[in-house]
Image (tube, rainbow, N blue to C red):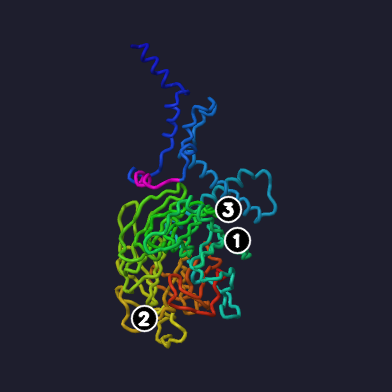
Amino acid sequence: MPANKKNRNKQKASPRDPFFANDSRKRRKPNRDDDDANAADEIDSDFDDDDFFAGERGENLSEQEEEQEEETGAEARKRIAQDFLRKYRDAAKKKKEEDEEDGSEGADEDEEGARDSLVAEKLMKDQQEESGRVRRAIASRVQVPETSGTDGGFRVLVKHRHSVTAVALSEDDTKGFSASKDGTIMQWDVSTGKCEKYRWPSDSVLKSHGLKDPQGKAKKQSKHVLALAASSDGRYLATGGLDRHVHIWDARTREHVQAFPGHRGPVSSLAFRQGSSELFSGSFDRTIKIWNVEDRTYMNTLFGHQSEVISIDCLRKERVLTAGRDHTMQMFKVHEESRLIFRAPASSLECCCFVNNDEFLSGSDDGSIEFWRSVKKKPTYIVKNAHTLPTESTKSEQIDGGRMPTENGHHHPDNQPSSSVFSWVSAVNVCRNSDLAASGAGNGSVRLWAIESETNNIKLCHDVPLVGFVNSLAFAKSAKFLIAGVGQEPRLGRWGRIPEAQNGVSILPLKIS
């Protein structure tokens, strides 16, 4: 018996046994729950098992290669943290070299300690801003350059043949992305406006990437794009439209890498969770789906809306804000598997965005902008007639440049909202971690607002002329400029037209005093 036991122990320790060589896959554990893993297994994956599970080639590896283990999760986090600190140290060193022309060699240790303290302060400040504890008060200090022309301070940066439906900016604000109704997807440099076009691959390549044949009312494939989103790490660009698929592109090479099927209606909105490869997609089929772009897998579906989902937003937390044509805006707490429902007085909410984790804005088709808090089911404040048409005579009746007060979240009885399609609030956006917001419509202007959370108020700061339907807005993280996607037609239809508008992307430089 002892001899048999000894032989069995030798077999277990043998590195040449192919059965135990395959055991290396156990070191790579997916960072998700068992339920999510089972759901993901039902969706086809483009991973090659032979490449993903490196241990299955154990029989052909040398003894030296077998001793090398894959990077663990802790090691990966350590490496990322070291790279992050190195980046901040280099930035602090560069700033110090710019501020001081002369330096002594004997003060290297002191200088390194000072840089580390600056890094610590920067990290703490960034963490507070990301968590929403600190908000930059910049709205009252923003200055808009005044230039001659019909578009005021805006200038055309990129031209499109058809109406622009969506715009997005990279995390470092150096490049942007835009999409239009004709299926054109552009990547451009913010400073120079130099454009590079994304080219759709052939149908055979798309099918090899996961594209399914049209189903239901759809008779043929359409490249009509309605939404796009850029990942925080700059690696991926996601687009969606009438073909009911979520398309993933490599933002570095502009090549198509994956098509996610699953939605039964047009994909109307997309949002990446900040700092992750988690992607949320909203659709006319009334659902929100969650995808892992890095693993190219489906994760989950969120239900709750009773009509089309047309706007979506997400910050760093696993909270998704959605707006639909069922009179509601909903915030899904994905990790807690719960949701909050906010009912709007308008017939349809056209857009929404987070101010921070507990405050958000929405724009509606009655021309109003609503300010919400997560602890209240009705708007805390409503801006009535936020984008009044120039031909309307209600300007003299407005209070403080377009604001209409509300009591307990209800509309003020004076001034009925305008029902014109040109005054629908089609886009709202907030400069990250600040009190500065922007809204757009088809009335010929983009408005900048100051969000006063302490007094539950929204004040008009600037009214900047811009001809056309403003279908999408994006603030630079640095608040140095605002990007607007403009078209002759609204994003989701053709019920209005402004022939004199320029289809394209316009930029508004901003200066903080």
Q: Quadrant of residue 491?
A: bottom left
* Residue carrying label 1: 196
Task: Give residue 417's mark.
Answer: 2
Nearest the viewer among 19 and 31 is: 19
Image spot of residue 288 (x, y percent): 37, 58
Query: Residue 352's spot in the image, x, y percent?
Result: 40, 66
Which amino acid is tagged 2? Pro
| Figure check: 117 above or below 510 | above
Taken as a whole, is the magenta stretch helix, strand or loop? helix
Name the quarter where the N terminus is drawn.
top left
Residue positioned 62% across, 54% down in the render: 95
Element carrying mark 1: strand
- Drawn side of residue 83 relative to residue 333, left or right: right
Q: Amino acid at mark 1?
A: Glu
Can see residue 433? no
How far apart, in angstroms, are the residues tagged by discs 2 and 1? 42 Å
